[in-house]
Amino acid sequence: MKILFALALFATALQAQTPEVPDWAQPGSPTHKQVPPPADFHRPARTSNTPIGLFEGQSDIGSALVPGSSSYDPAAKQYTLHSAGYNIWYSRDEFRFLWKKMSGDLSLAADVTFPDPKGYNDRKAVLVLRQSLDDDSKEIMTGEHGTGMVHLAARPERGANFRDYEYRLSAVGLPTSTNPNSRVDILPKRIGIERHGDQVALYLSLEGEPLHQFGPPITIHFEGSIYVGIGFTSHLPATPDTAILSNVILENSAGKVH
């Protein structure tokens, strides 16, 4: 009887430690269709104003079920971000965000790597400009997925669904720089984003060449100072993963990505 009672207590404790994931937050699969969150579903960010490297603060936007963490290695110039989170998409986000409040023109760039090669394909390391720390904030971001796909996308107004613009790049089957007829799967070496007035553009380096603009800019207007920084989501609501963003540059001027 004592053994059964102990097992029951253990099961209850284990259940209490296991975050309850709503069905809408599960990623798409052959047996599950990914859907937007309920319109009235929100969680406030968990925020620390502790500086880290170039950034003034750290937040878990949308407060994923498992708290995130981050560290900075100044010798290696590397930011390591751990985060769960169902997505950065639809009308709200869940991701780890290192930020600085800024205004005016901006340049932001970073190298991206994913230490676990077996992580979920749709995980995203991102460069972000957002109006606030609310989970449904107006924002624009460039994201590199676990597959290597890069895109520029925006939530044009608070609470709106993200718009995935046409400036997306799949890193599968790209022609090599030396032989256009030979194709190879590669991950971009570096991504960048620049804001000039209300124009925001995506920059890429595919094989180590200088960053170059990819596609035309997107127009998005922000009021006053905004939160600018780097982030990561595992795209799994209760399962953390890791991204490393290194050699980050952040300048209060356009034309400075490198």
Image (cartoon, grey):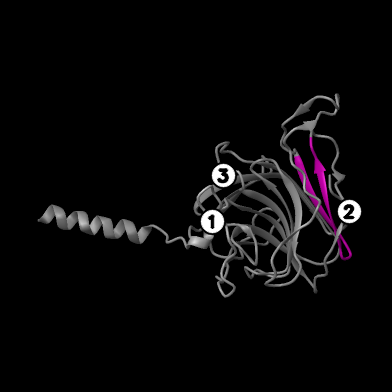
Q: Which residue is mark 1?
A: 68
Element under disc 3: loop
Q: Residues within 10 Å of mark 1 (few under 14, many from 20)?
A: many
* Residue 196 magenta: yes
Looking at the image, which residue is at 79% across and 37% down? 206
* Residue 201 magenta: yes
Q: Which residue is mark 2?
A: 216
**Residue 69 location (% of width, % of height):** 55, 54
**Residue 199 location (% of width, % of height):** 87, 61
CB atoms of marks 3 and 2 within 8 Å: no
Q: Which residue is mark 3?
A: 120
In screen coordinates, is 176 left or right of 93?
right
- Whole-number angstrom distance, CA of label 3 to CA of label 2: 30 Å
- Tell me which amino acid carries mark 2: Pro
Q: Residues within 10 Å of mark 3 (few under 14, many from 20)?
A: some
Q: Residues within 10 Å of mark 2 (few under 14, many from 20)?
A: few
Looking at the image, which residue is at 75% across and 50% down? 151
Q: Which residues are magenta?
A: 190-206
Of all residues, the one furthest to the left in this rendering is 1
Question: In which quadrant will I find the C terminus?
Answer: top right
